[in-house]
Image: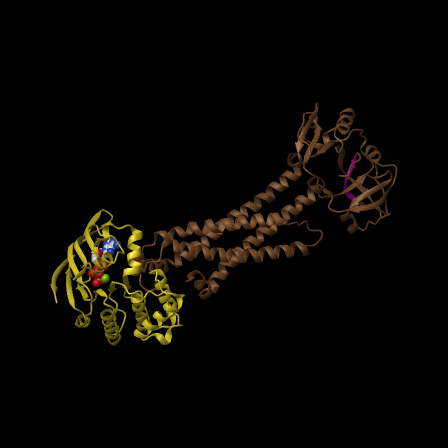
Chain colours: A yellow, B brown
Amino acid sequence: MAIFTIDEVRKTFTNGEVKEEILKGINLSLREGEITALVGASGSGKSTLLTIAAGLQPASDGKVIFEGTNMINMSSEQVRKVRASKFGFVFQFAHLVPFLTVEEQLMLMLDVSESKLKKHEQKKEVDKILKLVEMDHRKNAYPSSLSGGEKQRVAIARAIIHKPKVLFADEPTASLDSKRSKDVMMLIRNLTKTLNITTLMVTHDEEMLSYVDSIIKMSDGQVLQNAV
Amino acid sequence: MNIAWKEIKKNKVRFMILGSIVFLVSLLTFIISGLANGLSQDNAALIKDLPNGQFYMSKDANETYNMSRIDSSIQDKMLSKQKDAVAFSIQMGFLNDRAGKQQSVAFVTSTDSSLFKNVKKGEIVLDRSMEDKGIKIGDTLTNNQYSGKFIVKGFVDQRKFSHAPVAYINMDAYKEIYRVNEMQLIFVPGGDSTQVAGLQSFSNNQFLNTIASYKAEQMSLNMIVWFLVIISGMLFAIFFYMMNVQKIGLYGILKAIGVKTSALFKMMWTQMLFITVIALVLSVSLSQVFNMIAPKGMPFSLTTDTTVQLSIVFLIIGFIGATLSGIQIKKVEPLQAIQQGEI
Ligand SMILES: Nc1ncnc2c1ncn2[C@@H]1O[C@H](COP(=O)(O)OP(=O)(O)OP(=O)(O)O)[C@@H](O)[C@H]1O
Ligand SMILES: [Mg+2]
């Protein structure tokens, strides 16, 4: 079942006088609970597509349908609400808040998603997720004292603690070595399968493709093939 | 969760630097304003401490009090109509002390009134600052234009005019020294301005502003105070701006995960309020300490009113500065932050 559909999405950037069409009518859909990989040459428009789908920038044309509603027609406040409560994000860098401890990062995310849990329940939830990403022993550490892989694991924990419907990941393993990349990929797979989260992930790394359910290949702003 | 507070706790030094700027600028403003007020007190306490009312001088004096001569028949009429009205004169002059040293004073004489000191012939009452010059009760003072002698009867606090201590003398002595029969001014406390033929009326402030030296001095001091206020406003804005620029990436990430822009503004306002209040508490206390320990000869007077007023102005300025610089927060695109890499 498709939880997320992208329909004829176009994106045009204007650089001075020159108009450049970066996305030339993209169609794709994500099946619930599956991990979909977005691959393709550098500059083919993967990140642009991912951020449009995630509501981080508007499309020039087309539809982005999530849970039956076209996000293109939503106000920015409505989009923010969807982002805060239904989406999770992991990027190449962890982008943790530098002045919050690991535990506080996750508490903040629960706040932002307007979690109905009571304070002590929130703390329990944070402990649970930190155990899943094996970071519970560092819950009082600040980001500056964590290694790259540890930061990324905290970022993943932050992306899923509010039980989002969709996880967007843009090269989540690009800053990690190959062993850590595999660990992080395993983690994403296990977590999304356990929590039934649908995932759209951009990756350059061929090795990561063995962990995904379907692959979409992009070239020059278009989808090339839709293969499993 | 209070992320505003968490950030202050983690970045103490950064916030302390900002706070110390606010502290220093506000302290400087308080001190300058205390000096301005002190000088104004030193220049015209005699007039400033009078209750609100109306001053009258003769029209042909062209708003210069020491050119004014009030006709004695008009004076009698006014004083009989208004029970607490008082006619008085002020002239700068000199007294010779026992050692023969000349002391500059402002001679003041008046008709019977509780607002001025009335002294008998041959007596004199001086501003307390003359005590510091070694003059004591019972001393005998002379004036070159006066045939008699003055015996110091007592001292009064805070009676200054034109930066000189006031010397209250008997009207006959005054008339002899300055060879005049008429008084310069009539003061009617609490009175509304009424038309009196040949006289021009002034409110307390209007009258103070006819004293040229007073007006010029206050204008330049007030200008300094307001420049300081404006400059501190700019400093606030610039420092908040620089801090916000460093935090653009952070704001972007917070926005990306769904934090409301209004929450980011609240975070900034909370931090601004926290810093400004602490800095103001410190600078207010320090300036009050200064008020107490300022050397006697230094005219310094900082009232609670002025302090509260300036503090409110600083809070408003801090708020505006922070908000103006915070407009960037509104503009931050979450995407930029993500593409810019690690924060
Ligand atoms: N804000 C923008 N303004 C102008 N052009 C842009 C903007 N964002 C992206 N582009 C252009 O769109 C094209 C696609 O960019 P995008 O980041 O989506 O590529 P990508 O497939 O993610 O590449 P990579 O694998 O290198 O990350 C690039 O040519 C890029 O220069
Ligand atoms: Mg990219």
The residue at 79%/50% (across/down) is B131
Which of these two is toward me, B139 or A99? A99
Picture quadrant where residue B215 is located: top right
* Labels in figure, total: 0
Residue A132: image location, x then y, percent: 30, 74
Answer yes or no: is residue B343 visible.
no
Tell whether position B315 is magenta: no
Ligand 2 position by quadrant: bottom left
Residue lying at the far top in this picture: please name it. B197
Residue A162: image location, x then y, percent: 31, 64
Picture quadrant where residue B60 is located: top right
The residue at 33%/57% (across/down) is B255
Magenta stretch: dominant secondary structure: strand
Answer yes or no: is residue B58 visible.
yes
Left or right: residue A82 compared with residue B11: left
Picture quadrant where residue B177 is located: top right
Q: Which residues are magenta?
A: B103-110
Left or right: residue B257 compared with residue B273: left
Residue B295: image location, x then y, percent: 70, 54
Q: Is residue A108 above or below residue A16?
A: below
Q: Is residue B328 above or below residue B45?
A: below
Tell whether position B107 is magenta: yes
